[in-house]
Amino acid sequence: MKRNPDPPAPDTGEEDDDLGAAASGIIYTVMFLLVAYIPATFIGELFGNRGLPMSPWLFAPVVALALAVMLLFEPYLQSRTWWSRAENVWGVLLMGLSVVAPIVLAVVRPMPVWPSLPPLVPTVLSFGPIAFALWCVKLWHRHLRKRQRPQLGPFKPVPRISEPDRGESERD
C-alpha cells in the first residue's frame, strides 16, 4: 500500500468567506430594510409624501452589494494597526448605509405606489413585510421543531418538560 507523501493542501475557505459575505450582505439588507421601512414611510408621510415609497426596495440591491463588499473587506481591515480607531466609524457606515440611507431615500425620492391611499394607511401597510417575515420565520421554526423532535428508536417520543406525563395525569 502506497502512501501519498504530499499532504493535501489545507482548504483556505476563501470561497466560503466570499459566499458568506454576500449572504450576510443580503440578509443584513433585508433585515435592516424591513426595520427601516416603517419609519421611512411614517417620516415620508409627515413630509407630505403620499402612498408607499418604493425607492428603498429599488435601492436594496445596491445596498446589498455594498454591504457584501464591506463585509468581505472587513477581515482584511481588522488586521491593520489602525483598526481599533476606525472600528466605530465602520459600524456607523454599516448602519448608515443599511438603515439611514433607505429612510433618507424614501423621504427625498419616494417613488410612491398607490398615492390615493388615505393618510396613515401607508404606514400601517408598511408593517406588512415585517409581519410576513415574522410569520415565515415562525412557520420555519415549527417545521424544524416537528422534523427534529427526538425519538427513542421505535418507542414513543420524549415528552417535553412543560408537558405533564400521561401516566401522572391519569393518577390524579
Image: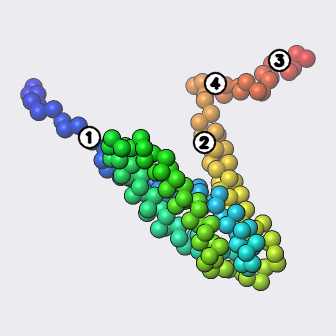
Instruction: Classify 149 as above or below 89.
Output: above
Q: Residues within 10 Å of mark 3 (few under 14, many from 20)?
A: few
Q: What is the three-letter code of the residue carrying label 4? A: Phe
Q: Quick one: 144 or 90, which is closer to the camera?
A: 90
Q: What is the three-letter code of the residue carrying label 3? A: Glu
| Circles 1 and 2 in contact, beta carbons < 8 Å | no
Instruction: Classify 125 as above or below 141.
Output: below
Disc 1 vs disc 4: which is toward the camera? 1
The answer to whether 80 appears left or right of 113 in the picture is left
User: Which numbered circle lies on residue 152?
Assistant: none
Mark 4 or mark 2: whose residue is earlier in sequence: 2
Image coordinates of residue 50 in percent, x first then y, are: 73, 79
Picture quadrant where residue 148 is located: top right
Residue at the (60%, 78%) spot, across then down: 109
Image coordinates of residue 73 in percent, x first then y, are: 36, 52
User: Which numbered circle lies on residue 168?
Assistant: 3
Picture quadrant where residue 156 is located: top right
Q: Secondary structure at mark 3?
A: helix
User: Which numbered circle lies on residue 11?
Assistant: 1
Disc 3 vs disc 4: which is toward the camera? 3
